[in-house]
Image (spheres, rainbow, N blue to C red):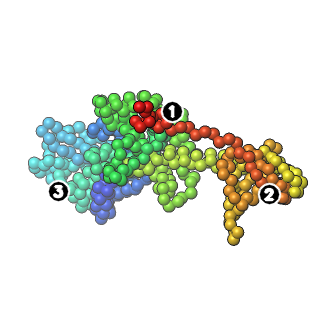
């Protein structure tokens, strides 16, 4: 059984013919079989020289026009320069005489001005016959020559269906290729989405990552003819060492694709992105969405890094808290060095606000002070004097509670003078000596 790859743009037209012929064949007890087996994506060069990728449906088609030992073998198109024979059954070798014969029907022996005749073959007698349209029904159980011609043209359609023409057909993009190009673009230029200037009501004159990826892919796959535009794009790529096949681009693209496939759906952007990259090929209308994947992956890595840093900071904090010891005796006056002095929270009550300050001494012991007034320039505090009020354990950390505290601040750094006129250096007219 023969199988063929049909471009999706041709499939509807093909199946209309198939359904029509199938009904005729069933009615006339002739064998016919058709099935869609699956799909493939193929790349070809169109009539303008552009590299295209299309979706093709693999179909299996089989039919045998056989009745009373006779079966259809070929059509003959009669021309002055010689006949054109279109064989239906490639296993049958049509006699050479039909290359030059006239349009005579060997059934009724009538000579007419026929444009086409048909060749039938008898399996028992191994006899070939050339017959006209009206006599064809004798060898096909009533299926006339016009139906036979449509039946055979069906297979011509199937065979020719792999080569789509025109601009109306749908093309596809290789998802991993797009992600590799986008990854390399983000690496060298950062991610630029389409900005909108609300006041001017127009897009700002800034190249987006989507536009850049489109240009660079076009330069690689032959979209641009040799000329200034192609030279500009190639120069731009060479200046930054653009290489979509670099180890970084390949590995990052694969990692990004694996990441997004494992992300939970959000009924929004992530869900759309997952759907767009779920197959090896995607429609060109999903191009912009796919280009955004490397940036989404970078945000994810940033989040993971931030989360890891916070976890490490929390571990370090726990280690400090675990090592903290009580300092001094209750009601003892202390003066301690203050490291990382800061207000951790503000408590409110009917009596007003209370400011909770925390700091560490040189041995990383924890001190706490509930102050009724805020401390100015708390980042400059280097020493705290006060009375030990209580020793208290919080989340397993030993803390020394202080009261009636006073702080010592470091000298505040001088602020840099702003550039400009210094009025002290100006002598006004009324200040000049007479």
Q: Is residue 125 above or below residue 217?
A: below
Q: Earlier in the sequence, mark 2 or mark 1?
A: 1
Disc sitting over residue 403 in the figure:
2
- 147 relative to 413 in the view: left or right: left
What is the CA distance from the residue labelled 2 to the residue labelled 1? Answer: 63 Å
Residue drawn at point x = 79 percent, y = 52 percent: 367
Q: Earlier in the sequence, mark 3 or mark 1?
A: 3
Q: Which residue is mark 3?
A: 134
Residue drawn at point x = 76 percent, y = 52 percent: 406
Residue farthest toward the right in the current orientation of the protein? 329
What is the CA distance from the residue labelled 2 to the residue labelled 3? Answer: 117 Å
The crowd level at tag 2 (other Cα within 10 Å; few <14, some 14-19, many 20+) is: some
Q: Position of residue 220 (x, y in %)?
A: 39, 34
Q: Nearer the viewer, mark 3 or mark 1?
A: 1
Can you say which quadrant of the picture contains the C terminus? Answer: top left
Residue 84 in which image quadrant: top left
Q: Nearer the viewer, mark 2 or mark 1?
A: 2
Q: Position of residue 41 (x, y in %)?
A: 41, 45
Q: Which residue is mark 1?
A: 246
Q: Secondary structure at mark 2?
A: strand
Q: Position of residue 38 (x, y in %)?
A: 43, 52
Seen from the viewer's position, the closer of residues 187 and 260 is 187
Q: Earlier in the sequence, mark 2 or mark 3?
A: 3
Disc sitting over residue 17 in the figure:
none
Q: Nearer the viewer, mark 2 or mark 3?
A: 2
């Amino acid at each position: 059984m023969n199988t063929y790859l049909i471009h999706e743009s041709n499939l509807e037209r093909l199946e209309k013919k198939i359904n029509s012929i199938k009904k005729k064949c069933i009615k006339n007890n002739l064998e016919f079989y058709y099935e869609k087996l699956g799909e493939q994506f193929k790349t070809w060069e169109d009539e303008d020289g552009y590299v295209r990728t299309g979706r093709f449906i693999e179909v299996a088609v089989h039919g045998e026009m056989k009745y009373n030992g006779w079966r259809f073998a070929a059509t003959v198109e009669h021309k002055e320069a010689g006949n054109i024979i279109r064989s239906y059954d490639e296993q049958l070798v049509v006699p050479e005489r039909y290359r030059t014969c006239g349009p005579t029907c060997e059934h009724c022996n009538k000579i007419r001005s026929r444009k086409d005749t048909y060749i039938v073959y008898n399996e028992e007698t191994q006899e070939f016959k050339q017959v006209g349209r009206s006599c064809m029904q004798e060898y096909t159980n009533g299926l006339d020559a016009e139906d036979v011609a449509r039946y055979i043209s069906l297979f011509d359609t199937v065979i020719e269906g792999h080569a789509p023409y025109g601009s109306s057909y749908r093309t596809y993009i290789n998802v991993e290729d797009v992600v590799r190009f986008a990854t390399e673009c983000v690496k060298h230029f950062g991610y630029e989405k389409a900005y909108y200037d609300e006041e001017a009501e127009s897009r700002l004159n800034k190249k987006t990552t989507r536009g850049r990826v489109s240009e660079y892919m076009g330069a690689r796959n032959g979209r641009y003819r040799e000329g200034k535009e192609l030279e500009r794009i190639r120069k731009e790529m060479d200046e930054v060492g653009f290489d979509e096949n670099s180890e970084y681009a390949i590995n990052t693209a694969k990692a990004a694709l694996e990441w997004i496939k494992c992300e939970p759906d959000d009924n929004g952007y992530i869900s759309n992105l997952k759907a767009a990259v779920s197959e090896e090929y995607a429609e060109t209308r999903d191009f912009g969405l796919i280009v955004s994947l490397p940036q989404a992956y970078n945000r994810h890595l940033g989040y993971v890094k931030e989360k890891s840093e916070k976890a490490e900071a929390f571990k370090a904090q726990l280690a400090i808290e675990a090592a903290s010891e009580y300092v001094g005796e209750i009601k003892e006056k202390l003066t301690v060095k203050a490291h990382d002095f800061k207000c951790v929270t503000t408590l409110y009550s009917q009596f007003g606000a209370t400011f909770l300050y925390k700091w560490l001494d040189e041995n990383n012991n924890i001190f706490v002070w509930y102050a009724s007034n805020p401390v100015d320039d708390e980042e400059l505090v280097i020493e705290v004097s006060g009375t030990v009020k209580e020793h208290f354990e919080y989340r397993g950390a030993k803390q020394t509670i202080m009261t009636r505290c006073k702080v010592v601040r470091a000298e505040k750094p001088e602020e840099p003078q702003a550039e400009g006129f210094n009025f002290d250096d100006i002598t006004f007219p009324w200040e000049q000596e007479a």
